Amino acid sequence: MTLRTAAFFDVDETLIRVKSMFRFLEFYLRMRGEPDSTYQRLNGELQSAAKLGVPRESINRAYYKFYAGENVRQVTAAGLLWFEHELEKGLFLPETVAELHRHQDANERVLLISGSFFACLDPISTWLGADRAYGTRPLIHRGQFTGEVLTPMIGATKGRVVRAAGSVLGIDLASSTAYGDHISDLSMLRAVGRPVVVGDDEVLAGHADRSGWRRLAPAVVR
């Protein structure tokens, strides 16, 4: 079997300018008629946990608890509206989108890997023409979110997914590329032969400089 090459992309602040999970939550709560203080409180809880050093995996799990009892179809529909809203304001980072199109033109697979979930990722993936999108998978029971997830798509899990995709899809990882903007993307970047660091995360930039990895110019994140 002839192996193909692929390009793996983190999404938030790599392909898009924003943190999709938080922007979507704010949008969804407003759609439901919640006051802005509701989002500020929920976001504040997660930000406080991060400052206390709570692992990103745990924060990711805590985020999805906000959706417990919510109707999956309604959240999915809201995701499409959120995407259209963000698209009008300039959602995508042109530097990395240009890279993505270059890989597509070379007939390489394009796979998105993110801690976000399908409500945000599916419209992004469709718009970009990506082959697949791997995100955190919320658990669903009788059409509603339970508030729990399987494994958060954070940190080492990203690297495992890249290696699994390489095996299942017949991808030559040594000749493939991955793009990430945060130190939590390190395992994904190390899983391929051509890592690319996006932006100016100091710790990740240090790894890039020591290892001779390619870097893209810092992107402005709003």
Image (cartoon, grey):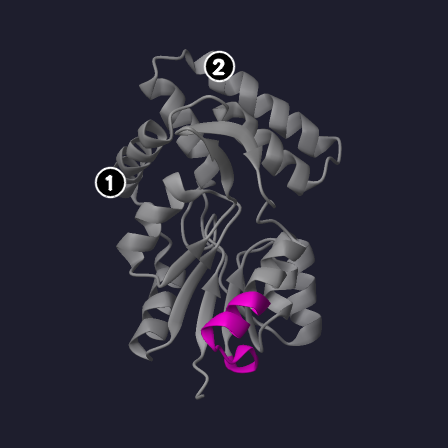
Identify the amino acid type marked 1.
Answer: Glu
**Tag 2's secondary structure?**
helix
Residue at 52% x, 82% y is 175
Q: Which badge, 1 or 2, comes first in the chain's sequence? A: 2
Is residue 174 one of those drawn in magenta?
yes
Q: Between tags 1 and 2, which lies in front?
A: 2
> Where's residue 128, x and y in %?
30, 58
Above-or-below relation of 198 to 115: below
Identify the amino acid type marked 2.
Answer: Thr
Q: How far is the residue under mark 1 from the one under mark 2? A: 25 Å
Above-or-below relation of 146 to 11: above
Kindly indicate whether the residue at mark 2 contacts the one at mark 1 (C-beta within 8 angstroms): no
> Where's residue 70, x and y in %?
42, 23
Residue extending furthest bottom?
Answer: 2
> Where's residue 23, x and y in %?
42, 33
The residue identified by callout 1 is 88
**Image quadrant in which the N terminus is located:** bottom left
**Tag 1's secondary structure?**
helix
**Image quadrant in which the C terminus is located:** top left
> Where's residue 7, x and y in %?
45, 70
The mark tally for this picture is 2
Which one is nearer the viewer's eye here, 173 or 168? 168
Left or right: residue 77 versus residue 62 is: left
Predominant secondary structure in magenta?
helix
Left or right: residue 129 versus residue 120 is: left
Residue at 29% x, 54% y is 126
Which one is nearer the viewer's eye here, 100 or 89? 100
Neighbours of disc 2 within 10 Å: few (<14), some (14-19), many (20+): few
Which mark, residue 38?
Answer: 2
Is residue 210 one of those drawn in magenta?
no
Which mark, residue 125?
Answer: none
Please report the bounds of the magenta region as a residue range: 163-175
